[in-house]
Structure formats: C-alpha cells, structure tokens
Amino acid sequence: VTLTADGKVTANFAENAKYLATVESGSGSGSYYAGATVEIIAKAPPAGKTFDKWTSADVTFANENAATTSFVMPEGDVTVEATYKCITYTITLISRRGKLADASGWELADGQYTRTFEGVLEEAVVIPAVTPDNPADWEFGQWRVVAYDGTDDAFAPGQVVAQLPVGFVGNITLRADFNWIGPNPSPWYPVYDLGEVGDGPRQVKVYRGDELVTSMVVRGAQVKPADYLKVGCPGLLSGVDYTFKVSKWNSDELCFEPDIVTPEYQLPETGAVVAGPPDGDNVVVLNIDLPLASKYRLSIRKGREVYLPATESVFVEANEDGFVLPNSVRQVEFFMAGIYDVTVLAINPLGEAVQAASCQVVIAKDGQDGRDSWPVAGFMPLAGQNILLGGDTTPVLFSWPAIVWGESYELLVYDGNGNEVAVQRDLLDCHATVTLPAGVYFWRVVAIDAAGQELSSPGQDFAVVAQNAAPILSHAAAAAGDPNAVVLFSDPASSNYAGVSYEIQFYTAASGWIEFMGNNRKVAVFSDDDLDGVYECKLDLGVPVSGGYLLLRTLVEGQRLDDGFVLFRIP
C-alpha cells in the first residue's frame, strides 16, 4: 500500500508465480501455478520399443507406469521424462522334413528352430536352407510366412521370405516348403512334333535342366505316348520346362536347335465308340477308344428321354495313342425297343473335352422286364449319391428308365423323416427337376398305364450336402520300407480338413480291382501330425502297391461329397 502527498492511497497486489514444466518424450509442457494438476501423455514408442515408465526428480506421478498420467505442480520448475524399453521378438522356423544346413545361432526345441532379438534387427538375418531327411524324394524349396504380428505387408502370411532385413520388427514364424522330386505321381506323355527331318529313325533326348529324363528312338513325324512307354519313361510333368534334343539315330548331329518345351495336357481326340449287336437279353457291348483322354463320360438317351445318366470312368493305362482303360468295354442292358443315342465325351486331366464320340443302338424288341418290373439301372440321382450344395438350395435333376406301357409318370420325393416334400404328376417325359435344400432324401417314381394301373419303382436314397473344401491330393507314393503300404500327400493351401476323409479302391494288373468300399472299405483320414503344413495319410493295403493304381472318393462328415474321384499311379 502506498500513500501520496495529496492523500491518495494505492493498494498494489503481486501476481502468483507460474513455474515451468518440461515434458521430454511426451506432451504437456508449459507454465503452471503451484498446486495445478498437469496432464501428460507419452509419445508413441519408437519401432521395437514399448512404453516403460515416467521418471522425475521433482514430482510424484499419479501412475508412473501409465503412458497417460498426471502430477501436481510444485513451487518450482520441473522436468519429467517418458522412458521406453526394448521388446524381445522371436523368429521361429518350422522344418519337419529336414534340418537347417547351418543352425548356428538357432536353438532347436520340439522340432522348431528359434532365435530372439531386442528392439529392431541391427543385422540382416539370412534364413538358412534345409537339408531334407529324404533327399531322394524331397528338395528344399523356400521359406513361407505362416504367422506375423507386424504391419509390413512384405511379411504377411503366405509371403515367401529369404531373409529378414535390418530394421525388421515383429514376431514371425516361417515354414519350410519342400518340392516332391520322387517318382512322377501323375505321368503324362505329351505328343511332340519332329517336323521334316528326313527319312530314318531319330534319337530324341529329353532333359529337365541338365538332367537327362529319357532317350527315345522314334520313327515317324511325332513322339507319341507309346515312345515314352517303350523306354520305361515315368512320364513328364505338365507345366514343367523340358529341353528336347533331336538327332539322327546313332549320331550326335542335331537335326535342329534344341527346343525348350513346356508340355501341357493335350486336348483328347474325339475317338470312337462302337456298339456290338444286342444279344438275346438285349445286352450290348460298347467298345470305347479315346486317344489322349484320361477319363470319359458316357450317357445314353432315347429321344428326349435319359436312359443312362452321364457317368464317368477313368483311364489308367496308356496305349500307343494315349490313355485307355484296360477294360475299355462297357456292357449295357436295354429294357425296351427303340433307337438309342450313345455318346462318350473324352476328357483330359485338366477337365478339357472335345466333341463327343457317338453311335446308335437299335433294339428290336422289349426286354423281359418291360412290363412287370423296373430295370435296375437308369435312375438318377443314383442310390447313395451325394449332391454338392453351393448355395441355400440346388436344382436336382431326376431321371428314370422308360416303361414300355407307361402312359405317364408320378415323381415322389421324401425327406429323411418320411415327409413328402415334392410330388409331380402326369409327367410324360422320364425326367423332372426339383429344387431342394441340404438334407437326406428318398425318391421313387410310379409308372401309370392307360387303364390307371400303377407300377412303383424301387426307392433311391440320396443327400444334398452343404459345400465344404476338401483336400487337394498332390501325389501318392509307396511307403518307404513297406512294400504293402502307400502314403498319400495333400496340399492344404486352401483346404478345410475338418471331417474330410477318403474311400479307397486299389487296382493291380495281377489282381484287378481290390474293393475297399462298402462294409470292407478303408477310410483315409489326413492329419498334419508333423506340423509342417503337409497333410499325410499312410494306408496298409495288404498287397504290393508298386505299379498299381489308387482311386479315392471324398467324404465330408462321413458322406460322399459327389460322384467324382481322383486316381493316382503308384511308381
């Protein structure tokens, strides 16, 4: 307070002092009155680190271990600092088919190699190659990411990785991919044009890289499947680069420059189907010859009516033109007079087909079963068939053999509880379509004559199965050290193995088809016990497997997925 000469009194008030708060590695710096609450937030941690705690010699924090916290401003300047600590990361390598060629710096436990680092990688880590345990059948391919908790898309699951660079951050797991180099699991014998190279035989040598695959003496303008077979060639792989070197026989002089060829499955030829004359029981023998096909689809119609629904068979042996089923003769019984159109569609392993071969069968008289009973064959869906459902419902085509005296037909479909779910009456054709959801069904058809008399067909059961991803078999091979066992391998790239199994049939030239179906079926259940991403199944078939053929049908939850199957030759 001051008093002037003129008698005025002035009161002077001092402002409260502010003090400076300095926040290092965070926000909240500024000037504050003593007693004020100061909110502070730590900066985002640098790569490879995480927030640790707040430190200061001047204040006490509400929670020194929280990235966001506060303190009470004292009477004086203060400095606080956010501190960080390094994260420990782990690199994991899974290699169940072999050992690291150089394991220095890696720890091995439970079949996995690991090493750790703090913060960020200061030196690049080159992932070692793998020496396979069975180098005759497998070669190391590459390392592929199966798990990664970082943000760099270059290391996302599925990416191929050879090394981790300086500055890498994160936990990562890599799996070793291996390539099968054993006997060719799916042999193919591609036709190769030799061109105009003069008269006389030619020597054709086929190389894969520097390795000689086969050497053939060829007469004619083409290398044909028979030429490979004559010299015991196990076949070539579709999509693999080969070098064809053509020279005159018994000479090293090349007819033309070596040709780099990537064989692709040939389009099958149309071929032919020839029908023999019907015997006394209206049984007709169909002789089928379809060069360069791996399977065929047979169907028979009588006018607009389906007599035999399209069914597929697989060729398993190669003749001089291509693949031909050992018993490429089909017997078909016809139950009523008429003219039948027989078609056979040739299909290669890629599912490609050409125009179907066809012939006609003329039946002059009705079969003995024409009036009093239904024939056994000719019903579709087949008994026990599973139809794959891709959406909520699917149209199901029903067809049945014709009855001579039938004026009309009645189709009846029941669910698994015996409830009638569809009825179609007064059908003039031997086919009809019903849309159904997933479920188990039973169906029959009734033939009705002009007087209203009825004849009911045998019942046929089938199921509409919700679609599931099934394993894709990569190959089959004889089990090492066990001549009566085979190992199946499948590719899990886009597969769901839950509930998936296979029914097995096995064929040898000596014993024919050995049935593992029905009550005696063997079911192959795949598993990844080695945790290497390769799903395997070993089967003891009880007979020598080398040179035989293995046929598998897919089941999901114990039910067949469809009527398709895969076939593998066992080297």
Image (cartoon, rainbow, N blue to C red):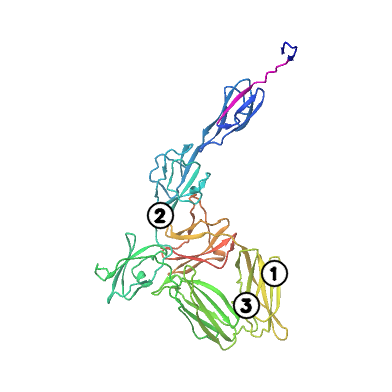
Residue 469 image position (x, y, % from top left): 56, 59
Residue at horizontal 72%, vertical 86%?
451
- Alpha carbon separation for disc pair 2 and 3: 50 Å
Counting residues from the start of the chain, the first of labels 1 and 2 encountered is 2
What secondary structure is found at the residue carrying circle 3?
Answer: loop
Amino acid tagged 2? Trp
Mark 3 or mark 2, which is nearer the start of the sequence? 2
Q: CA distance from mark 3 to mark 1?
A: 17 Å
Q: Tell me the quadrant of the picture where the C terminus can be found.
A: bottom left
Which label belongs to residue 53?
none
Image location (x, y in percent) of residue 97: 43, 50
Describe the element under mark 1 as helix, strand or loop.
strand
- Look at mark 1 in the image and give the residue it sits on: 414
Q: Which residues are magenta?
A: 10-24
**Does residue 26 show up magenta in the picture?**
no
Residue 256 visible in the shown view: yes
Closer to viewer: mark 1 or mark 2 = 2
Query: Residue drawn 37% across and 72% down?
Result: 226
Contact (CB < 8 A) between labels 1 and 2? Answer: no
For label 3, the residue is: 400
Q: Is residue 207 or residue 512 the one in the foreground? A: 207
**Residue 507 spot, x, y in % from top left:** 46, 67
Mark number for residue 138?
Answer: 2
| Cα distance in 3D space between marks 1 and 2 | 52 Å
Residue 538 in sight: no
Crowd rating for badge 2 (residues with CA inside 10 Å; few <14, some 14–19, many 20+): some
In the image, what residue type sits under mark 3?
Trp
- Quarter assignment of residue 203: bottom left
User: What amino acid type is highlighted by mark number 1?
Assistant: Tyr
Q: Say which element carries label 2.
A: strand
